[in-house]
Structure formats: structure tokens, C-alpha cells
């Protein structure tokens, strides 16, 4: 296994993963011990601050919203995977092959919408279970928090979408990198209240913004036209643990 180069962004991502892990287990404890509180909050209590005070779920909602707003207006500390949508981050490779860019974009679009179809199909199962009363709003919240954790598992450790569908070499080059919030809050669409719909529709805005920039400026998203997306230019190095895991699996298979 190769030694991990702890770049500033790599350290930040690991800290964020620890934060997401703590959020997941905190909500899991509430889910297992006081599920009725989650149901009550998800259906009635979001605006009852005067009566009940600020609770952990208010803080969780604020953290989710802050996270998405930062993706709408990303600061410089973000990964190149997100910043590549910015004009000032585009380092054009002279005389790049525009026909090859077109082929790349067409292939990636097909792969991306395959992911979307699979994702919506899987979550449609949870929607049906919810509509028939088999699962409750607390279960959908727990599912969203699980997706919240899985988002960083995919970035740091292993991403099935990358390996089986998108075939991109890393997150920096990922066509669907900023789909994470939409995927995370898909279960919130099925619950009709402010807490859930505010999260889902804000995540939809993040997704639409990403897709508009991608459609207008695809050259910013391809390593064949944007020098900053090539490994030689990468300062993020967030792929290191994922690569080591892949190498270890390959050795075990031999």
C-alpha cells in the first residue's frame, strides 16, 4: 500500500467524515430510543421553538441548509471536483479535441442518467412503503442521514457508482459529483412538511445549478480540455485511500 499524502483537503475530508459519522450515530440513538420524538418533529414541531425550544433536529436542519448554500456559492477551500464549474478554475489545454469532448460528454450523460434512474427506482420502493404506512417519517429521516454518511464513504473509501457505472478515475473528474445533496434528501420528498421539503427542494436547486453549468461549459469538466483535472495538477489527493483499498482487493483476488 502506498503511503497516504495528508494534503490539507484530505485532512479536512477526514474531519468531515468523522463529523458525519457522529451525526449518524447521534440520530440513530434517538431513532432507536425515542422514535416518537422524530415522528412528532417531522410532522408538527419544527416551528414550535417557543413551546419546545431548539432541539438537535433544528441544528441538523440548519447544518444541512448551510452545507447546500456553500455548494451554491463554493469558497476556495472546496475540492477541485466542485470548483471545476467556475470559469476562473478552467485551465484550457490548447487545441484540445472538440469532437472527443463531445463523445466524452455524450457517454457521461448516458452513464449519469443511468445512475439517476437506478437511484429514483430504489427510492421509489421507500416511497411506496411510506405511502402504505409500512415505514414512517422517522424511518425516511434515518435513511437520509444514512445517505449523508454514505456520501463521504463514496468520496473517501469506495464508490459503487464510480466503479460500476460512471467509470471516472476519481471524484475530481466525476460527472455527478454535486448530485450528492439531491441523492441525500430524495427521501425527504415523500414527507409533506417544511423540514423535509425545504431540504429536498434546496438540494434540487444545487443539482439544477450544476447541470446548467455542465450543459453550458462541458469543457470545464473533462481532463482532456481542463488541465486542472489531470493527476499532475491535482492538489486534493482525496483518492488515495480509495486507491489503496482497490489495490488491496486486487491483491486478495490473485
Image (spheres, rainbow, N blue to C red):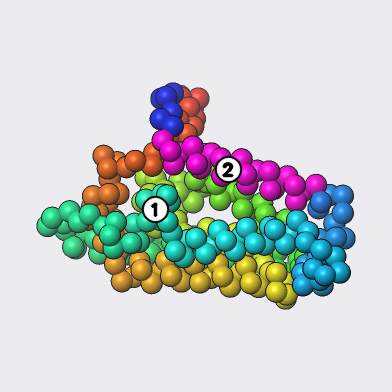
Pick out the residue farthest to the front: 50
Q: How many marks?
A: 2
Q: Residue at x 70, y 58 (%)?
A: 59
Name the residue that disc number 1 marks.
76
Quadrant in which the N terminus is drawn: top left
Foreground tag (2 vs 1): 1
Q: Is 27 colored magenta in this rendering? A: yes
Pointer 2: what residue? Answer: 17
Q: Seen in the image, is 143 located left or right of residue 43?
A: left
For label 2, the crowd category at 10 Å Cα-Cα, with few meaning under 14, some 14 to 19 and many 20 or more, is: many
Query: Residue 205, relative to residue 16: is it above or below?
Result: below
Considering depth in this image, is 182 or 113 the residue closer to the camera? 182
Q: Earlier in the sequence, mark 2 or mark 1?
A: 2
Residue in front for this viewpoint, 237 or 49: 49
Give the magenta range: 7-29
Q: Dots 2 and 1: beta carbons under 8 Å?
A: no
Q: Quadrant of residue 84?
A: bottom left
Place of residue 217 in the rendered image (x, y in percent of width and height, measured from the top left): 29, 67
The kind of secondary structure element at disc 2 is helix
Q: Looking at the picture, how far across and down is residue 165, in whole percent?
A: 45, 53
Q: Which mark is residue 241?
A: none
Q: Residues within 10 Å of mark 1 (few under 14, many from 20)?
A: few
On screen, residue 188 versus residue 244, left or right, reads right
- Residue 228 in the magenta stretch? The answer is no
Q: Residue at x 39, y 38 (%)?
A: 237
Tag 1 secondary structure: loop
| Residue 5 screen position, x and y as percent | 41, 30
Measure how far apart labels 2 and 1 are at the Cα level.
20 Å
Amino acid at each position: 500500500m502506498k503511503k497516504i499524502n495528508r494534503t490539507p483537503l484530505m485532512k479536512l475530508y477526514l474531519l468531515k467524515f468523522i463529523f458525519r459519522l457522529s451525526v449518524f450515530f447521534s440520530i440513530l440513538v434517538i431513532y432507536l430510543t425515542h422514535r416518537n420524538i422524530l415522528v412528532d418533529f417531522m410532522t408538527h414541531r419544527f416551528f414550535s421553538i417557543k413551546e419546545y425550544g431548539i432541539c438537535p433536529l433544528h441544528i441538523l436542519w440548519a447544518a444541512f441548509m448551510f452545507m447546500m448554500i456553500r455548494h451554491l456559492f463554493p469558497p476556495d477551500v472546496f475540492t477541485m471536483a466542485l470548483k471545476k464549474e467556475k470559469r476562473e478554475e478552467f485551465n484550457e489545454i490548447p487545441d484540445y479535441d472538440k469532437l472527443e469532448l463531445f463523445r466524452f460528454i455524450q457517454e457521461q450523460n448516458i452513464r449519469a442518467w443511468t445512475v439517476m434512474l437506478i437511484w429514483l427506482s430504489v427510492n421509489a420502493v421507500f416511497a411506496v412503503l411510506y405511502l402504505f404506512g409500512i415505514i414512517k417519517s422517522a424511518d425516511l429521516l434515518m435513511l437520509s442521514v444514512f445517505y449523508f454518511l454514505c456520501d463521504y464513504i463514496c468520496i473517501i473509501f469506495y464508490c459503487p457508482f464510480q466503479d460500476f457505472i460512471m467509470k471516472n478515475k476519481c471524484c475530481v473528474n466525476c460527472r455527478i459529483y454535486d448530485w450528492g445533496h439531491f441523492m441525500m434528501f430524495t427521501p425527504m420528498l415523500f414527507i409533506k412538511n417544511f423540514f423535509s421539503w425545504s431540504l429536498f427542494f434546496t438540494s434540487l436547486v444545487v443539482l439544477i445549478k450544476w447541470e446548467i453549468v455542465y450543459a453550458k461549459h462541458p469543457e470545464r469538466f473533462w481532463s482532456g480540455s481542463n488541465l486542472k483535472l489531470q493527476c499532475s495538477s491535482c492538489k486534493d489527493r482525496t483518492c488515495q485511500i480509495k486507491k489503496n483499498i482497490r489495490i488491496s482487493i486486487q491483491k486478495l483476488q490473485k
